[in-house]
Amino acid sequence: MKSNLIKYTFIIFVIGIIIFAIYSIYFKEKEETPNEQQVVVQESKTEIKDLRLGISNYDTINPLLSNNKEVLNINRLIFEPLMQIDENYRLKLCLAKECSKTSDITYIVKINNNIKWQDGTSLSAKDVQFTIDRLKEISSVYSYNVQKVISLEILDDETIKINLSEPVPFFEYNLTFPILSYNFYINDNFVQSSKIPIGTGMFYISSMKDGIITLSKNPNWWNIENENSKIETINIKLYSEVGEIYNSFKLGNLDVFNTSNTNLEQYIGTIGYAKKETKGRKFDYISINCEDTILKNVEVRKALDYCIDKTNIVSSVYNNNCFVSNFPLDYGNYLYNESSVSSGYNQEQAKKILQDNGWEYKNNRWQKRIDGSTRRLDFDITVCKTDASRVAVAENIKTQLEQIGIKVTVNKVSETRYKTALENKNYEMIITGVINSYSPDLNSFFGASNQNNYTNDEINTILNEVKSINDENLLIEKYKRIIEIYNSEIPFISLYRNKQTMVKSQNMAGELKPNNFFSYYGLFAWYRM
């Protein structure tokens, strides 16, 4: 009996200890929970009040006179065009509130004359006329935009009529040059003026001294309701050469810079910064003479395309410092969908296409009876011998094609002969390239007198239709069809395009959204950490 009493007492004691422990833990957790929530580490965000940029080889801040790419880039914060291009290369109204095409060679532009210059005067049609007249008088990077303008008529203070010498596809994209003030320069020599120019943009030039151009936020910017920036000033530091920019960035004296340098890491290392690589507009491709006896056959062109490993070219020739390209608009244009890409490098598919179309692989060569003669796949690729990179690309392509039984001769010619061959289209294949327009004009690739001697009635019809289409969805459908035809007929072979790089310091947070028109989309949502 006594033993049972001791046993029960011990059990009760243990149960009591357990209850007490549970009770203590429960209330301790209740007490500590608020404290734990208080000590959760929050990402520290500091609004950017001032931004530090850098420019090397500075020439002038005047946007019509400067030849410095980064000056022109930054100038878009100060000076504005009639029409703007967004981050996906869509065309938007800016200083113009309306732009109407009244004939193939006539455009009526209405400006928003409620917009003020940074000195308080009103924007007017005279400013547009003044700017275009200057561009036709001087040598400017924007002179090409108005090359076909033969006359201007001011219809009223907010309306101007632009007359062209001939139709220009997507001419509205040419109206993306900065507009300058007529009244500001009325009594001044435009080219020799030492005055600090004014614009209509988000920032104005508040000072230029001691190697620094300071931009201050324009409190009267007309588009202020669409701008959430907390940045008050932008300090642009001027350097004599790009190496000084790299050193200044490493020392923490710059927040962001742009470069086309493909060996950036050897100058600034690999840590302490973030970068965004974007596709440039320098586009290289193989132009194919589609009137050639053999190359006029679609199956041969498609087989050539399947046989060329573009990734191998980019890696071995360019050390991955450019992007593989599959179409002229694949630099980020909204009219090109990445899902439209063809199947790419595939030697087995190339062999099947040739076999299905009567080509026979014999003695390590492809051959076929054509018009009573045995013809073999044997081509010349023309390249300028002074262009070492393209020569290397041609040799790479020669090696790749000969692996599958297509003989290639690399025809290395002088610069003069190369230009003559291009102009006369006197080649079988030639490696060439262009700087893509901001507009989605594809006439030089598919239209009349295109470089490839290629004709397709459906594409010609579409190219004429898109000139007058304003509906974005319909435009996308039309371009989708062009891309489908390109993938099925391969009138030329897209190869690669250059890279542009935007670099920002590691204490800057926010999405980088640069493109070739403007580097600082999304900049105003950035913050410091």
Image (spheres, grey):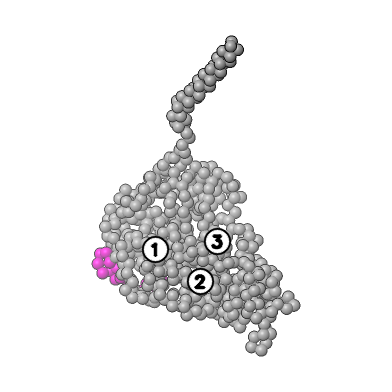
* Residue 427's disc number: none
- Quadrant hosting residue 65: bottom left
Q: Which residue is mark 3?
A: 498
Q: Earlier in the sequence, mark 2 or mark 1?
A: 1
What amino acid type should be assigned to the residue bearing mark 1?
Leu
Which stretch appears magenta?
147-161
Of residues 462 and 397, the one drawn nearer to the viewer in this rendering:
462
Q: Is the residue marked by circle 3 packed among few (<14), some (14-19), or many (20+) residues within 10 Å?
A: many
Q: CA distance from mark 2 to mark 3?
A: 24 Å
Front: mark 2 or 3? 2
Q: What x and y, as percent, mark residue 212?
A: 44, 47
Look at 59% across and 10% down and name the residue there: 2
Residue 149 position (above or below residue 278): below
Q: Main secondary structure of the magenta part?
A: strand
Q: Is residue 287 left or right of residue 45?
A: right
Classify mark 1: helix, strand or loop. Answer: strand
Look at 48% across and 61% down and name the residue there: 332
Query: CB under 8 Å between callouts 2 and 1?
Result: no
Q: Which residue is mark 2?
A: 484
* Residue 91's disc number: 1
Q: Earlier in the sequence, mark 3 or mark 1?
A: 1
Furthest residue in direction right, as rendered? 363
Of residues 470 and 495, the one drawn nearer to the viewer in this rendering:
470
- Quadrant hosting residue 370: bottom right
